[in-house]
Amino acid sequence: MKRPSGDTALAKIIVVTSGKGGVGKTTSSAAIGTGIALKGFKTVIIDFDVGLRNLDLIMGCERRVVYDFVNVINKEATLTQALIKDKRTKDLFILPASQTRDKDALTQEGVQGVLEELAKDFDYIICDSPAGIEKGAQMALYFADAAIVVTNPEVSSVRDSDRILGILQSKSRRAEEGKEPIEEHLLLTRYHPERVALGEMLSVSDVEDILAIPLLGVIPESEAVLKASNQGTPVILDTESAAGLAYMDAVDRLMGEERPLRFLDVQKKGFFKRLLGG
Amino acid sequence: MTDLGFQLKGSVVTTVLLEIQTLSLESILSQLKEKIDQVPHFFNQAPIIVDLSKIKEDVPLASFESLVNSLNHLGLCVIGWRCNQDDKPTWYADVVTPLLPASKTRSINVPEPVTTSVSPDVVVKTVVEERLVPQSTKVITKPIRSGQQVYAEGDLIILTQVSAGAEVLADGNIHVYGALRGRALAGVKGDVEARIFCKSMEAELVSIAGNFMLTDALQKIIWKEAAQVLLVDDSLEIIPL
């Protein structure tokens, strides 16, 4: 398959970020990384959450972690030793974070070195950012070409996303070098059409209005996400679930395809369903 | 933003010009001392420029130097001197005090002192030079996000939105061609004529020359509609556009 940038030696670096914690960054990184790999692109997902490693659990490879991202930065291990090949999806690799270190272990030169080496082999590099706007998050976004800003439909998450958008446009390498700005995508997760209808949650258009960036996808709140996390399977592989299908739509849009938004409407319960409390 | 540790700028400063009418140092000093004693604060450490252009005869270097020394001794600060551009004294390059170019502004022509009268030999004139320095307008095309701050020395034009938690400031007017959800402060250096214009008023705070209004008050007047903010007799007026 053709390389995404059209350029043979350059992988596309995508940061999955949000500012706020618990909105679904790691779930989204795992799902989107898997989705891109399913399309035949060689993809690596890097966990930047040093000290709070989670990606390995979501990907179900926690028992196979020997070396990690910090080991590679410190040249205690080679990339080949640290990369974990996903068992389910071809062309997908995971670079886990170190659980015993903190974010200071990430140096700009170190991260750059690892990314440059990965860029030789991979088409897509997904950086799973930690929460916050401090060093870890800034390291994850610094070298990015594109950003997926994961937001929940509630005011504090939206404001934090707004903040991280400001940092993307001012503190990234592209901003510092005056290059074309990082391409921004809004991914709305944990969307609850019923609660939106009741006015308890912001609607898609409310969030779009506040953040003013293109919408990549809306992932409905779904039990399948929790189930998938606990099983260590990216939810995108669950093609029965609305969340899995919505992530696949988002990956298609990321690749430039047109997909209508779905799962935004309140599911009308039929008479019997209501009667039976279904 | 540049990483330069300084900025070079042109500036207009008001100083006192001491136009010398006579070479009699003694009379200059005694009369000047009298003036100073009337308003000592005004002259204390005041920058002063010595103007020799009204003196027809040659000014000896020694006279000039003792004049400068005496003026400094009186508590003034001689920051430069001037003379006729075409008739510079021979020693003009030898003194430490900078020679300033002749004034281009029209100074009020004071009639030559009549030698027979008792009119003062020294006339202290204040020449204020005013130049219009055009303040550049800053134009922002990207959204101002939460946590960002933008300041313009002149007017500030924002073509998109100002997010909640962002702050925009200008010495002049602020135009927001989108929703204003953050804080906007116009006329921050005290310009009471400054105004704020926005396409949708949803601000956390608007301020003109230090007079401000918060969301709660704004919501009662105009909300989520095009509005302008101006100062009328020390109170903010929010009117629809």
Image: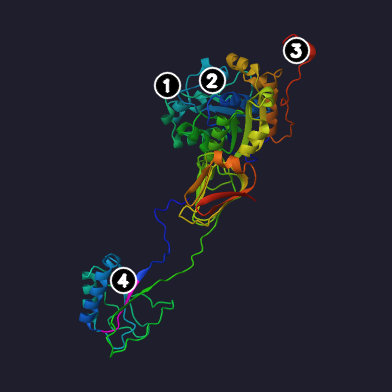
Mark 3 → mark 1, Cα distance in angstroms: 50 Å
Which of the two discs, 3 and 2, sits closer to the camera? Answer: 3
Which corner quadrant of the image does residue A196 belong to? top right
Q: Residue at x 66, y 23 (%)?
A: A195
Q: Position of residue B117 (x, y in %)?
A: 28, 88
Q: Which residue is drawn at 54% across and 40% down?
A: A166
Q: In which quarter of the image is the N terminus of chain A?
A: top right
Q: Is residue B16 visible?
A: yes
Would you say residue B77 sits in the magenta stretch?
no
- In terms of depth relative to the viewer, which is nearer, B176 or A99? B176
Type of residue at label 1? Thr
Would you say residue B20 sits in the magenta stretch?
yes
Type of residue at label 3? Arg
Type of residue at label 2? Asp
Q: What element carries label 3?
A: helix
The answer to whether dots 2 and 4 both sit on one chain is no
Span of residues in magenta: B16-22
Q: Mark 2 lies on which chain?
A: A
Residue A190's label in the rendered image is none
Type of residue at label 4? Ile
Mark 1 / mark 2, whichever is N-terminal:
2
**Label 1 crowd (10 A; few <14 / some 14-19 / many >=20):** few
- In terms of depth relative to the viewer, which is nearer, A15 or A206? A206
Q: Is mark 1 on a helix, strand or loop?
A: loop
Q: Position of residue B80 (x, y in %)?
A: 31, 72
The answer to whether dots 4 and 1 both sit on one chain is no
Which residue is the site of mark 3?
A274
Which residue is the site of mark 2?
A56
The count of marks equals 4
Which residue is the site of mark 1?
A100
Residue B48's label in the rendered image is 4
